[in-house]
Image (cartoon, rainbow, N blue to C red):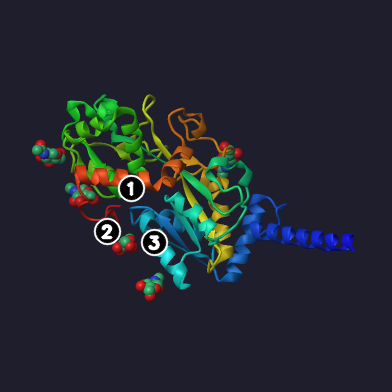
């Protein structure tokens, strides 16, 4: 009697295991990555061919290339990226989840703490895409509920010609040089937690005196992390410089504004995290999207700065992200999970430089 009960329990358990393994993959795990993508593509077509992704970002045109790339790669599919700051997307998602009116199937956001919370609340669907084992362990959930899709970085940027003539800053302390007075354009740290993190690292090393000296350089504070690049490029800030923007690691030869990476100072990298919602309107399309994003094709492309995968070579002239002693995507996660500290910093910056002013970068036709 005892034996048969534990046998029943055992088989029920293995049934459950087999079932949850299927749910996590959504495809036969013995398929090659390309075969898995083809399989998910067929399922996504049967499901209706639609997908909405809430994508964290601050430029309304920033996902146009990705949209056409996805729709061309998968004829019959129609992906729509809704771009807004991650800190606004998460509120909308919570509202929709509460009302049972969820619009996106996937969220792909900077606000990594939301994914820890959504997992705890049972709002996410586990999925183990191809190449899972190659994703850096510190930027994925061990139970497959969320993963970073790409690693984003902000760093010093200026006109290429200014870097060539040695007339542009690379290290933290360079920005305090009197020659950069009136030339610095930066995103409000109290409007974007990634920029806030950059300042947190600076403050922990040099104290608030650094920030006071920087402010005394007559910084032009703007909304959106793409805005400094646009304003440097079009000469609104003449010979402008910044460190609150991300730029391509493989710039076109004629790029006017280029990034440089410090060797002595810390720089920001973080995994832009994605998950599928348990109540996703289009779960197969959501799995297809995540599998495709993690494929060689996208991870190697110039639209990704650093790959989330350990087996993808870095861009020419760069090292693998874990080989830099002065950056850590894991450190960013620790920062984002410490909400009291984030809030303290936000308000301290608000006192120093005021609340974010100016037009939302999402309404700027130049980005
Ligand atoms: C972004 O979110 C904010 C806050 O919810 C909202 O006011 C704004 O209209 C949104 N922007 C776009 C472009 O959807
Ligand atoms: C959810 O319901 C609240 C309260 O009725 C409402 O204010 C909000 O607009 C609704 N949100 C959505 C996304 O429908
Ligand atoms: C501060 O910098 C801006 C941008 O370069 C410039 O337009 C403005 O005149 C500067 N203000 C002062 C007081 O120098
Ligand atoms: C430069 O770009 C900014 C931001 O998009 C815009 O407000 C400004 O009008 C542009 N200036 C010129 C001269 O194009
Ligand atoms: C992407 O990079 C990997 C490893 O660096 C390489 O093996 C693969 O061939 C590349 N794929 C494409 C599509 O470029």
Give how far apart the Cα atoms at labels 2 and 1 are: 26 Å
In the image, is the residue at mark 1 within 8 Å of ligand 1 by its beta carbon?
A: no
Helix, strand or loop status at disc 3: helix
- Can residue 75 be spotted in the picture? yes
Front position in the image: 114 or 295: 114
Front position in the image: 365 or 275: 275
In the image, is the residue at mark 3 within 8 Å of ligand 1 by its beta carbon?
A: yes
Q: Which corner quadrant of the image does residue 185 belong to?
A: top left
Any mark on residue 363, and which?
Answer: 2
The x and y percentages for residue 58 are 33, 53
Please report contact status of discs 2 and 1: CB closer than 8 Å, yes or no: no
Eye-nearest disc, 3 or 1: 1
Provide the residue designation for mark 1.
343
Provide the residue designation for mark 3.
91
**As drawn, 349 above or below 365:** above
Give how far apart the Cα atoms at labels 3 and 1 are: 17 Å
Residue sitting at 33 percent across and 53 percent down?
59
Instruction: Please rate how many residues cluster around mark 2, counting C-alpha atoms within 10 Å: few if below 14, some from 14 to 19, many from 20.
Output: few
Eye-nearest disc, 2 or 1: 1
Q: Quadrant of the N terminus?
A: bottom right
Residue farthest along the front direction in this orientation: 2
In the image, is the residue at mark 2 within 8 Å of ligand 1 by its beta carbon?
A: yes
Helix, strand or loop status at disc 1: helix
Chain-order first, disc 2 or disc 3: 3
The x and y percentages for residue 32 are 68, 50
Left or right: where 167 falls relative to 9: left
Front position in the image: 122 or 291: 122
Chain-order first, disc 3 or disc 1: 3
- Can residue 136 be spotted in the picture? no
Give how far apart the Cα atoms at labels 2 and 3 are: 20 Å
């Amino acid at each position: 009697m005892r034996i048969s009960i534990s046998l029943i329990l055992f088989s029920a358990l293995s049934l459950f295991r087999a079932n949850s393994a299927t749910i996590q993959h959504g495809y036969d795990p013995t398929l090659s990555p390309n075969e898995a993508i083809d399989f998910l593509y067929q399922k996504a077509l049967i499901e209706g061919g639609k997908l909405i992704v809430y994508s964290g970002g601050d430029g309304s045109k920033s996902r146009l290339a990705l949209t056409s790339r996805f729709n061309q790669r998968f004829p019959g599919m129609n992906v729509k990226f809704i771009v807004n700051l991650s800190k606004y997307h998460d509120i909308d998602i919570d509202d929709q989840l509460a009302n049972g009116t969820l619009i996106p199937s996937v969220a792909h956001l900077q606000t990594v703490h939301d994914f820890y919370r959504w997992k705890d609340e049972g709002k996410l669907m586990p999925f183990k895409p191809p190449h899972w084992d190659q994703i850096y362990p510190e930027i994925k959930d061990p139970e497959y509920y969320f993963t970073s899709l790409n690693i984003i970085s902000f760093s010093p940027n200026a006109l290429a010609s200014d870097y060539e003539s040695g007339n542009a800053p690379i290290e933290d302390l360079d920005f305090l040089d009197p020659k950069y007075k009136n030339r610095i354009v930066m995103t409000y740290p109290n409007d974007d937690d990634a920029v806030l993190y950059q300042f947190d690292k600076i403050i922990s090393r040099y104290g608030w005196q650094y920030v006071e000296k920087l402010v005394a350089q007559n910084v032009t504070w703007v909304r959106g992390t793409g805005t400094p690049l646009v304003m440097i490029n079009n000469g609104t800030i003449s010979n402008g410089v910044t460190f609150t923007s991300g730029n391509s690691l493989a710039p076109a030869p004629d790029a006017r504004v280029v990034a440089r990476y410090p060797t002595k100072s810390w720089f920001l990298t973080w995994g832009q995290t994605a998950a599928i919602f348990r109540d996703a309107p289009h779960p197969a399309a959501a799995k297809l999207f995540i599998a495709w994003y993690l494929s060689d094709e996208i991870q190697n492309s110039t639209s990704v700065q650093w790959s989330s995968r350990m087996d993808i070579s870095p861009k020419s002239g760069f090292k693998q992200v874990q080989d830099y002693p002065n950056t850590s995507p894991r450190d960013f996660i620790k920062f984002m999970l410490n909400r009291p500290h984030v809030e303290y910093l936000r308000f301290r910056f608000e006192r120093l430089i005021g609340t974010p002013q100016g037009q939302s970068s999402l309404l700027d036709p130049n980005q």
